[in-house]
Each structure stands twice: as C-alpha cells, then as structure tokens.
Amino acid sequence: MGFLSSIDISGSALTAQRLRMDVISNNIANAETAETENGEPYRRKVCVLSERRSFSSVLGDQIGSGVKVSEITEDDSDFELEYDPDNPLANAEGYVQMPNVDEIEEIIDLMEATRSYEANVTAMNATKSMAIKALEIGG
Amino acid sequence: MINEMFENVNLLQKGLDAAWTRNGVIMNNIANVDTANFKSSSVTFESAMKQALSEDEIKFEAKTTRPEHYDFSDSAAEDVSPTVVTDTDTDYRMDGNNVDIDYESTELAKNTLWYYELSEQVSSEFSKLKTAISG
C-alpha cells in the first residue's frame, strides 16, 4: 500500500457517496415530474456500488482500492396513480401517472449516504495524521 | 555491530508496515460499507510476530569472527509479514455485505493509536542512538 494511495481509497468512497447523494437529490427534485422527454413520468434512479480493484490488487490478492458507482439503474416499479381530472395529462378516468419516487425512502437513503461520507472523512483524517506522524520520525 | 544497532528499529518498522497495511484494509472496508456482496478483510500480524519472537529467543546462536563463517543468527521475526484475510463466511445484512461499521471504526481508532505508539518508539530509538553518538 503506497504512502498516499491509501488516501485514494477513502477518496473514491467520497466521490461515490457524493454521486449517490446527487442521484437521490435528483429523485427528490423530480418527485412530482409527471412528464419527461420520453412522455412517461420520471423514473426513480438508483446507484449500484461495486468494489474497485486495481490491477495489482487482483494479481496479489491484496487490499482492494476503494469503491465506485458501477451503474445508475432505473427502478422499474409501477408509477403512482393520482386523481387529478383537470390535469392535461389525465386519462379518460381522470387519473395521472406520477413518478415512482417515495420521498421518505429517498430521505433515509440520503441520511445513509451522508453517514457513509462522514465515516470515510474520519478514515481519511486518521490516515493523514498517521502519515504526518511517520514524517516526524527522527525529527 | 552496526546491524545490531538498528535491530529494534527494523522490528518496529515491520510493525509500522503492518499498521499501514491494516489501515488500508480498514479504509477499504469503510469505503465499501454500502457495496452489495462485499466481504470485509482484516490483517493478521501480531500473533505471528509474537510466535516468531519467542522462537528467536530459544534459537541457537554461534559467534562469527570471520566473514566466511556461517551466520546462524537468522531470525524468524524478520520473515514475518502482514497477511490480509477476507471473511467470506459471514453475512451481516440482507445484501450479502458483512462490514460492521462500528467494529471498523474502533479498529481504525486502535490502529491509528498503535501506529502513533510505534512511531514514537522509533523516534525514541533514534534519539537514544543520537545520544550515544554525540555523548
């Protein structure tokens, strides 16, 4: 494990969790978006995290090198139906299809991402202080 | 003589290396706390080192006075290196991930303090040598 490359491990997690927070924010922002470019309501997006392995870590079967967002998938659960006959998008029965975003779920995911972000900041600070301590040897 | 002078420093350096490797492993565990099917790893070092040191204590030593004499003082402790072990047998959550964030945080705190301790030891070892050299 290189002197500064271990900071990149936590760095990759900060990037991944921040992207996750961005995706969650986008879901919350579009919770009421009944029409998108393809004519459907907005579909909830989910980040898929996977372990990042560097070439040397696969060869040596050693430590991984952090985490990455491998894909952002769409949640294909059913859209919500909302009764709103005055809406131009309403069908013959007066129902409008609304996004499959549950705000409570998003807020909980957001909290989880924030906590993970904080844990990684703590780990990064610990590593930084260890590196500084090592530089003080013999001083 | 010059080799003996740094014997303690070399041992402590192995400890520092192990602590640094462990730090990398803990960081990777924390980074992957939300990754599905990720399995946590840990580093074993201290028990192997302890065993090697106790083996060294009962080892046969011969005085070498000429360069062609065989050196018996090969120490087992010098060959000990940290090993990364992945725990593939347990599940902690429904998504197959087994990172316990509380455990990892305490391990991180412990490991950081241990690293501090070792680097203090190295510093004090050097300051002793400085005293011996400058008088």
Image (cartoon, coloured by chain):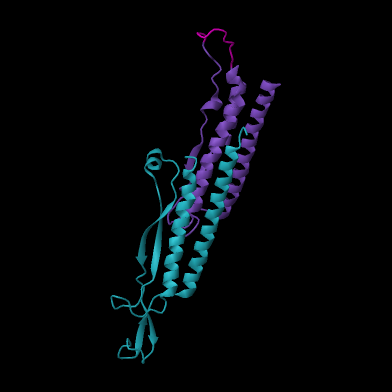
Q: Position of residue B9 (x, y in %)?
A: 60, 28
A131, above or below A125, in the image? above
In the image, residue B69 lies at what x, y percent? 52, 9
At 35% across and 65% down in the image, what residue appears? A73
Is the C terminus of chain B in the top left, top right, bottom left or bottom right quadrant? Answer: top right
From the viewer's perspective, is residue B119 above or below residue B91?
above
Quarter holding residue B77: top right
Examine the rendering and report whether any part of residue B100 can be seen. Answer: no
**Is A34 on the left-hand or right-hand side of B54?**
left
- Name the residue rendered at 60%, 50% in the picture: B106
Q: State whether the magenta stretch is mostly helix, strand or loop.
A: loop
| Residue A48 visible in rendering | yes
Q: How many marks?
A: 0
Chain B tint in image? purple
Q: Residue at x 38, y 78 (%)?
A: A33
- Which residue is depicted at the point 60% across and 20% down? B4
Expressed as whole percent of the image width and height from the top left, the position of residue A27 reads 42, 71
The residue lying furthest to the right in this view is B135
Q: Would residue A87 be found to the left or right of residue A5 on screen?
A: left
Direction front: furthest residue: B134
Residue B70 magenta: no
Q: Colour of chain A?
A: cyan
Between A68 and B58, the one lying in front of the other is: A68
Q: Front-most of B74 and B95?
A: B74
Q: Which span is picked out in magenta?
A: B60-69
Quarter of the image where the N terminus of chain B is located: top right
Residue B58: give x, y in percent of width and height: 61, 20
